[in-house]
Amino acid sequence: MMTPEKILYETEVTATGGRDGKAASADGLLSVSLSLPKSLGGPGGEGTNPEQLFAAGYAACFLGAVKLVARTRKVVPADEPSVTAKVAMGPVPVGYALAIELKVSLPGVERSVAEAIVAGAHERCPYSNATRGNIDVKLTVI
């Protein structure tokens, strides 16, 4: 188990109403409606869902780690890098589990160098550390 040596940032988000409810941060900066997707037996609707929120958080956090590792290796992409997180959910013997693919674009960076940067980011990213050994995370350089 990994425990931070010291806390640098913390946030609080409260969900009400479950998958067809709302989620809001204590500081008021995040406020979203939630809707259960039709593919999971719900009505669909205008709201987001936990999987989309997780994908957004993981993609943004991983991109920060990619940029950090690239900077420390003095690698400058030709254009803005990006990370697309694909989060899938399906049944397991008891409950449900997630599978994740992180698609990383490092324009103008040689594939082997980009793959090394992505591997380094996967070691540093807090989301990667939280999911390691729990969720299948596929890393793809595009």
Image (tube, rainbow, N blue to C red):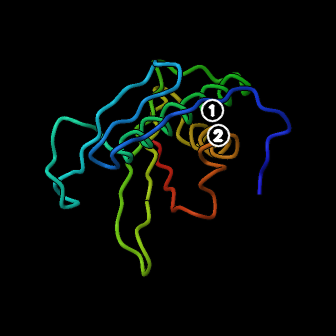
When the figure is inspected, residue 77 is found, relative to residue 55, above or below; the finding is: above
Label 2, residues with CA under 10 Å away: few <14, some 14-19, many ≥20 = some
Q: Judge by depth and name the residue closer to the eye, 91 or 123.
A: 91
Quadrant showing the C terminus: top left
Inspect this view and state whether residue 142 appears: no
Residue furthest toward the bottom?
93
Residue 50, how many percent across, how many down? 38, 46
When the figure is inspected, residue 137 is found, relative to residue 31, above or below; the finding is: below
| Of the image marks 1 and 2, the number of the one nearer the N terminus | 1
Q: Which residue is mark 1?
A: 65
Residue 133, how many percent across, how many down? 63, 64
Q: Secondary structure at mark 2?
A: loop
Disc 1 + disc 2, Cβ < 8 Å:
yes
Q: Secondary structure at mark 1?
A: helix
Disc 1 to disc 2, C-alpha distance: 6 Å
Tell me, for residue 125, which label it has, or none.
Answer: 2
Tell me, for residue 5, which label it has, or none.
Answer: none
Residue 32's image quarter? top left
Quadrant showing the N terminus: bottom right
Inspect this view and state whether residue 80 appears: yes
Residue 84, how many percent across, how many down? 40, 38
